[in-house]
Amino acid sequence: MTARQRLTARVELVAEGDPVALDALERLRQRGPPGSRVEQVDASRGPASAEFTRFKITRS
């Protein structure tokens, strides 16, 4: 999974995994973290690319 904070205050998220886990992730995105305000969630699904083998947090 990769997530990026965009300059427009939007967040871009790309994830691969089990459909049930992706459904749960989508529900979490609609709520957002504590103190956040989620105005809109756009989602689309396509075939997995196998690009992601692990997850880590990096600061830019």
Image (spheres, rainbow, N blue to C red):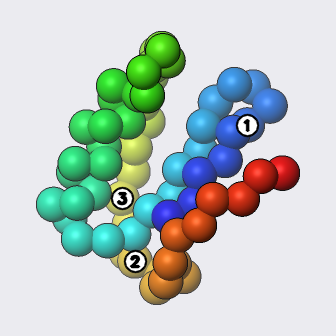
Observer-nearest of 56 and 17: 56
Q: Which residue is drawn at 22% across and 60% down?
A: 21
Kind of residue sitting beneath label 1 = Arg
Q: Are marks 1 and 3 in contact (CB under 8 Å)?
A: no
Q: Where is residue 38 in the image (x, y as percent from the top left)?
A: 45, 19
Q: Is mark 3 on a helix, strand or loop?
A: loop
Residue at numbered disc 2 = 48
Relative vertical location of residue 39 with respect to residue 22 in this rendering, above or below = above
Q: Where is residue 26 in the image (x, y as percent from the top left)?
A: 30, 43
Left or right placement of residue 48 versus residue 35 in this view: left
Relative vertical location of residue 57 with respect to residue 29 in this rendering, above or below = below
Q: Which residue is drawn at 54% across and 82% down?
A: 51
Categorize mark 2 by other alpha carbons within 10 Å: few (<14), some (14-19), many (20+): few
Residue at numbered disc 1 = 6
Kind of residue sitting beneath label 2 = Ala
Q: Position of residue 37 (x, y in %)?
A: 48, 14
